[in-house]
Image (spheres, rainbow, N blue to C red):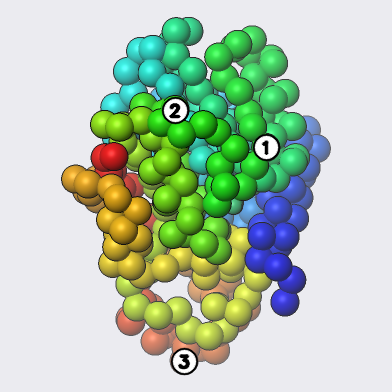
Amino acid sequence: MKDLKEIVKEKYGNIVKQKSEESCCTPSCCGPSDDGSVISIMAEDYTKLEGYNQDADLNLGCGLPTEFAMIKPGQTVVDLGSGAGNDCFIARAETGAEGMVYGVDFTPGMIDKARENVKKLGFENVKFVYGDIEEIPLDSDLADVVVSNCVFNLVPDKVKAFRETYRILAPGGHFSISDIVLEGDLPEGLQEAAEMYAGCVSGAIQKEDYIDIVRGAGFQNIKIQKQRPITLPEDLLSKYLSKEEIGDFNVKQGIYSITVYAEK
Ligand SMILES: C[S@@+](CC[C@H](N)C(=O)[O-])C[C@H]1O[C@@H](n2cnc3c(N)ncnc32)[C@H](O)[C@@H]1O
């Protein structure tokens, strides 16, 4: 099997390329693509949020982390795995011109798209930085708030990524992260599918383990602000599982979108 990070970069590179080539308006009118099919099932509606920018919304999130991020005017916000900049522009609406917003992503096409978007909007205080969130290329104690949307499940070393999140947060800062977690083990057929890894399913870990990693990185006052079950459609499951396994899967396993808050 190819290196997991390479699979993720290739997948998200293809998604951004494909979305940029689509000539029609909103993602929903274009219909789900092969590449975006798993992940777009998890996305929530951003269109009513202040700062929303359609070009930055590739339908790739699994929650609304900014909803619980308590971002204040003038603050510094970092979005980990920022994609085309969707949450960065919502955060910018809250920090205002006096704040600073950084987006970090390791897919070159995503960074290019996000920079194209910020250029169109003319914001001077939104910067997109190329890099891996296991080694965030930003200074320590920089951020008042970290947000992230559907990214940590894609990161092989989640311990390292949460330690890095802790490092870049200023003392007293906090994060609000939306992500995918599991309850119960995934059947082998799903665990081994690259599409399911890049689609934010098989890289997800058990909810309890996730919270333990957050605690282990040094965070306090950890709260799950929101939890929503994710239902994978049967035609997708049937690509990897037998009828019997699908029946079992629906009874024994749970896939959830959670939005977690924690303080440094
Ligand atoms: C599911 S998409 C979400 C994008 C964005 N947060 C949104 O909601 O639109 C995951 C993003 O995380 C990025 N990503 C995955 N693993 C990463 C890593 N280790 N370091 C930096 N970015 C990563 C991918 O390139 C992709 O843009």
Expressed as whole percent of the image width and height from the top left, the position of residue 136 reads 56, 42
Residue receiving disc 3: 244
User: Which one is nearer the viewer's eye here, 221 or 168?
Assistant: 168
Task: Left or right? Give the position of 215 relative to 257.
Answer: left
Q: Is residue 87 visible?
A: no
Q: Is residue 244 visible?
A: yes
Tell me which numbered mark, 1 or 2, is placed earlier along the sequence. 1
Task: Left or right? Give the position of 98 relative to 108.
Answer: left
Specify the farthest residue to the bottom: 244
Does residue 1 sit above or below 48 in this rendering? below
Q: Residue at x 59, y 66 (%)?
A: 197
Mark 3 neighbour density, 10 Å: few (under 14) some (14–19) many (20 or more): few
Residue receiving disc 1: 130
User: Mark 3 and mark 2 in contact (Cβ < 8 Å)?
Assistant: no
Quadrant including the N terminus: bottom right
Label number found at residue 142: 2
Task: Left or right? Give the position of 74 relative to 12.
Answer: left
Secondary structure found at label 2: loop
Tell me which numbered mark, 2 or 3, is placed earlier along the sequence. 2
Mark 1 neighbour density, 10 Å: few (under 14) some (14–19) many (20 or more): some
Q: Quadrant of residue 192?
A: bottom right
